[in-house]
Image (cartoon, grey):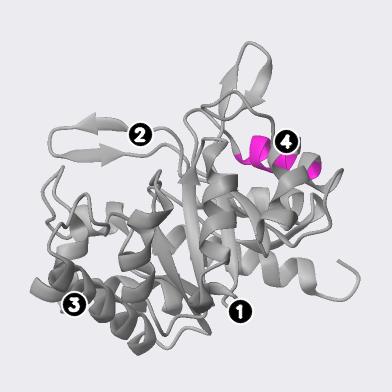
Amino acid sequence: MGSELISAGLPLGENGAGWNLTRPADVLAVHHAYVAAGAEVVLTNTFQANPHTIPDSAELVRIGAAAVALGRQAKARFVLGDIGPIENAGDLRPTINALAGTDGIMLETFSSSDVVALVESIRRWPEMRELPILLSLTYRRAVNGIESSSGHTPEWFAERARNAGVDALGVNCGREISIGDCAEILRRYRTVTNLPLFARPNAGTPTRNGEHWVYPRSPQDFAAGVKELLSAGAAMIGGCCGTTPEHVAAMRVALNREKEPGA
């Protein structure tokens, strides 16, 4: 969503969640483009919608409600409430309440071990006892291999996810993390958990060209990675930063091919 809104004119550094109110047609156009490309799930345009970036609680509620409505208008099969990394569970409550009416909550791009306690906290809220929580973690390559920013391995998170209240565990984005790396992370998750798994690679680490970001990973690269992600255990695949509708369309074709008899 972020890179698509930037392509539509969102200035670099501006919180795109405000467009749910000021330029809803542009947000809806992004959703429609992905659904037309074959996406069955859309995320609300709320990655940066939280009390730290939007301190006016009434405005936060309006932005969240508009985001959910726009997601529903796109006619996707599922709409997930998107929440980016935040440390304090209490800070999440206004955001989650603003996302009432979604099919689940996606906590994405978290990279600290603190997220386990965060999920445990919000799972105790009455409004969150039944709503699915999808946790998507971001990793980096370090001296000791793939790890989170807090130095924890994929296995560490997978061992704790279910007891914390996570319903599906995934990986997204990550600087210099390839589609193959995402598949490796899923395989490592699977050694210690039977939770549903998902992967949303980015379109590569971007370089800046003036007011635009250029992403090196092509739609063909994404299509080529579908089989490995499925073999690694992915129940859902998608894309993160820089992933255009063309990337999703290529994945959709590859996914349909893999589902054909004899594939």
Residue sitting at the far top: 143
**Mark 4 or 1, nearer chain start:** 1
Residue located 15% across and 43% down the image: 12
Q: Residue at x 80, y 43 (%)?
A: 187
Residue identifier under label 3? 62
In terms of image quadrants, where is residue 31? Answer: bottom left
> Dot 4: within a 10 Å radius of its alpha carbon, few (fewer than 14), some, or many (20 or more) residues?
some
Whether residue 186 is visible here, answered yes or no, is no
> Which one is in front in this view, the residue at disc 2 or the one at disc 3?
3
Helix, strand or loop for disc 1: loop
- Across and down, in percent, residue 137 comes to 56, 44
Q: Within 10 Å of the Cα at label 1, are there few (<14), some (14-19), or many (20+) other Cα atoms?
A: few
Query: Magenta span covers which residues?
Result: 179-187
Residue 132 is left or right of residue 158, and the answer is left
Under mark 1, the amino acid is Glu
Question: In this rendering, which labeled residue sits more in front, label 1 or label 3?
Answer: 1
